[in-house]
Image (cartoon, helix red, strand yellow):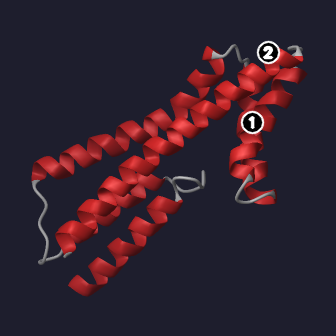
Amino acid sequence: MDIFLIISGAILMLVGIAGCVLPILPGPPISFFGILLLHWTTRVSFTEDLLWTLALVTVAVTALDYVVPIYGTKKFGGTKKGIWGSTIGLLLGMFFFPPFGIIIGPLVGAFLGELSAGQDTNKAMRSAMGSFLGFLTGTLLKFIACFVMAYYFVAHLL
């Protein structure tokens, strides 16, 4: 049973890291479940403090991932149409232009959304950059959280 849990946990860690850039997959929660699977083996036992800390980090990073791009767009003068454009651009870019569409899609989507809201080109580009920076910040936070969990997974397994 331990081998099954370890292999399943390792797969979840890899899927969690992939989920940092794929908006369909919630990366940090998947990685956290990988940590839990390893904890449930007889071979590895994490402290309660570590598990609670990783759980809180997972919840915080997941929540911030939704808030940071919106905050970035608003901070740079964006409108709701810019936020929607960024989201639609992310989804279209992910499916039609992988892997670069994940990065370029939100930028182009926010720009077009702002233009459709009547913003001039400079304001639209500024808002698009805010959305883009917010997206990058959220992605970076997810990567950091997932790689920290992957580190604990590997370090405690070896």
Q: Identify the residue position indicated by label 2 in the image.
A: 123
Q: Which residue is drawn at 69% across and 46% down?
A: 103
| In the displayed structure image, the side of residue 147 where residue 38 appears, left or right | left
| In the displayed structure image, the side of residue 43 where residue 147 appears, left or right | right
Q: Which residue is drawn at 74% across and 60% down?
A: 98
Amino acid on which disc 1 is placed: Leu
Q: Which numbered marker is on residue 107?
A: 1
| In the displayed structure image, the side of residue 133 where residue 101 appears, left or right | right
Q: Which numbered marker is on residue 49?
A: none
* Quadrant position of residue 129: top right
Nearest the eye: 102 or 54: 102
Q: Which residue is drawn at 36% across and 73% down?
A: 10
* Viewer can see residue 157: yes
x and y, in percent, of residue 118 in the image: 89, 14
x and y, in percent, of residue 138 in the image: 51, 38
* CA–CA distance in space, label 2 to label 1: 13 Å
Q: Residue at x 75, y 36 (%)?
A: 107
x and y, in percent, of residue 48 in the image: 11, 52
Is 19 placed above or below 38 here? Answer: above
Amino acid on which disc 2 is placed: Lys
Tag 2 near tag 1, CB within 8 Å: no
* Quadrant position of residue 96: bottom right
* Viewer can see residue 36: no
| Label 2: which secondary element | helix
**Quarter of the figure with the N terminus:** bottom left
Is 92 placed above or below 15 here? Answer: above
**Quarter of the figure with the C terminus:** bottom left
| Label 1: which secondary element | helix
Q: Which numbered disc flags the more N-terminal residue, 2 or 1?
A: 1
Nearest the eye: 129 or 71: 129
x and y, in percent, of residue 131 in the image: 66, 29
